[in-house]
């Protein structure tokens, strides 16, 4: 297992032109340890790739520090940082064989021919590609080309592996296969890896921890479960998974929890509370104190109307492992998604129904005490 530590401290990147000044990354702080598979996740233009490029030395930092095992990375060139990189475009040399492509970085480092042969054969064995060593990139499938790019990044035993949207050019089925392959290789080698993607399912499935970015800011860092179950902002709750939102009035505070009332008078006792930052306070509807967020699997539907929310079922979708009900409810900001492990007897499209909320799993996003 790797014992390396990467520390990103108050990292910022400002792009300036004659007419504009744009902050792409705004005071980001991260710490990544050992053989973590760490993912930077967010929509296009959120700053995740710019952060990765600054770590790699491909982008000059505006302010802040990047330390690897206590050493200031800003004093080293990209080559000196001993980083393996895999890009969205594989950047393979079409006139070189698989073996020659993988060996290229070793030749640049002036490694002996005997050692090159040993190292390349070893990494090709690890990626189950030995039989393809004499082929040329144009003769390979997309997944095979991706494996060559990964082998080339790993063959010289880098201290860190950086992957920037490496699966974007693959079809959906192959993406799933390759993300599992990347995760297996990463854990087999015990190498610190930083993965950039906008695909939340991809990030959730392979990451030990992930960082969610938005508009240049780091919104939250945590395990996939922490970020999904305990989002610390409305943005994260909406970007990760499906979420339902109910405007709420706070009617009582009792120690660590609150009592809230929804639009039509349903009362809830909630213990998961998040104070919104100034940028998101404006998301709360006028005259309300907060927004209750509930994941679809923490709602239930029934034909009973006791202590629940009235709704009308608009759409029912059977999705294999669960059934999704899309319903209209006056208490909600938008249509409500309810996920059930099995179809609910007596409820069809157009049916009147009632929504039940699992209070321990609901989160109140609120303005704070001011």
Image (cartoon, rainbow, N blue to C red):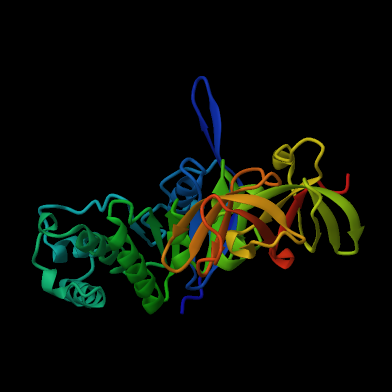
Q: Position of residue 250 (x, y in %)?
A: 85, 50
| Residue at image coords 17%, 74% | 117
Q: Is residue 44 left or right of residue 108?
A: right
Q: Nearer the viewer, residue 302 or 105?
A: 302
Q: Nearer the viewer, residue 66 or 200?
A: 200
Q: Is residue 138 left or right of residue 355?
A: left
| Residue at image coords 38%, 62% | 82
Residue lying furthest top: 19
Q: Quadrant of the rendered structure where residue 147 is? A: bottom left
Q: Is residue 232 visible?
A: no
Count of picture labels: 0
Q: Nearer the viewer, residue 47 or 312?
A: 312
Q: Is residue 334 visible?
A: yes
The C terminus lies in quadrant: top right
- Residue 67's place in the image compared with 282, above or below, is below
| Residue at image coords 26%, 66% | 151
- Residue 321's place in the image compared with 8, above or below, is below
Q: Position of residue 306 (x, y in %)?
A: 76, 61
Q: Position of residue 254 (x, y in %)?
A: 91, 62
Q: Position of residue 215 (x, y in %)?
A: 56, 41
Q: Quadrant of the rendered structure where residue 317 is? A: bottom left
Q: Is residue 328 left or right of residue 308?
A: left
- Residue 141's place in the image compared with 283, above or below, is below
| Residue at image coords 67%, 57% | 354
């Amino acid at each position: 297992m790797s014992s390396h530590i990467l520390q990103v401290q108050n990292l910022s990147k400002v792009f300036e032109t004659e007419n504009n000044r744009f902050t792409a990354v705004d005071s980001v702080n991260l710490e990544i340890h050992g053989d973590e598979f760490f993912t930077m996740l967010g929509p296009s233009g959120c700053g995740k790739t710019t952060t990765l490029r600054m770590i790699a030395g491909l982008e000059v930092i505006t302010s802040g520090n990047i330390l690897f095992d206590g050493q200031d990375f800003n004093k080293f060139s990209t080559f000196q940082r001993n980083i393996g990189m895999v890009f969205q475009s594989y950047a393979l040399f079409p006139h070189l064989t698989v073996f020659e492509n993988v060996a290229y970085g070793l030749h640049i480092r002036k490694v002996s021919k005997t050692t090159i042969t040993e190292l390349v054969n070893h990494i090709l064995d690890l990626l189950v590609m030995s039989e393809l060593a004499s082929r040329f990139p144009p003769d390979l499938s997309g997944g095979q080309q991706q494996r060559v790019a990964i082998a080339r990044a790993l063959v010289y035993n880098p201290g860190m592996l950086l992957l920037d949207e490496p699966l974007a050019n693959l079809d959906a089925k192959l993406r799933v296969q390759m993300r599992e392959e990347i995760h297996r290789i990463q854990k087999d080698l015990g190498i610190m890896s930083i993965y950039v993607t906008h695909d939340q399912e991809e990030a959730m499935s392979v990451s030990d921890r992930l960082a969610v970015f938005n508009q240049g800011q780091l919104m939250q860092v945590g395990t996939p479960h922490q970020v999904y179950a305990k989002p610390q902002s409305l943005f994260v709750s909406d970007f990760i998974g499906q979420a339902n939102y109910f405007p709420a009035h706070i009617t009582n505070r009792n120690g660590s929890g609150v009592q809230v009332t929804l639009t039509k008078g349903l009362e809830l006792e909630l213990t998961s509370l998040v104070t919104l930052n100034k940028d998101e306070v404006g998301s709360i509807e006028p005259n309300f104190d907060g927004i209750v967020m509930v994941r679809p699997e923490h709602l239930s539907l029934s034909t009973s109307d006791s202590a629940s929310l009235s709704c009308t079922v608009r759409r029912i979708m059977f999705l294999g492992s669960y059934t999704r009900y899309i319903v209209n409810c006056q208490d909600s900001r938008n249509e409500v998604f309810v996920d059930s492990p099995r179809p609910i007897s007596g409820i069809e499209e157009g049916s009147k129904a009632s929504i039940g909320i699992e209070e321990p799993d609901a989160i109140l996003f609120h303005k704070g005490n001011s």
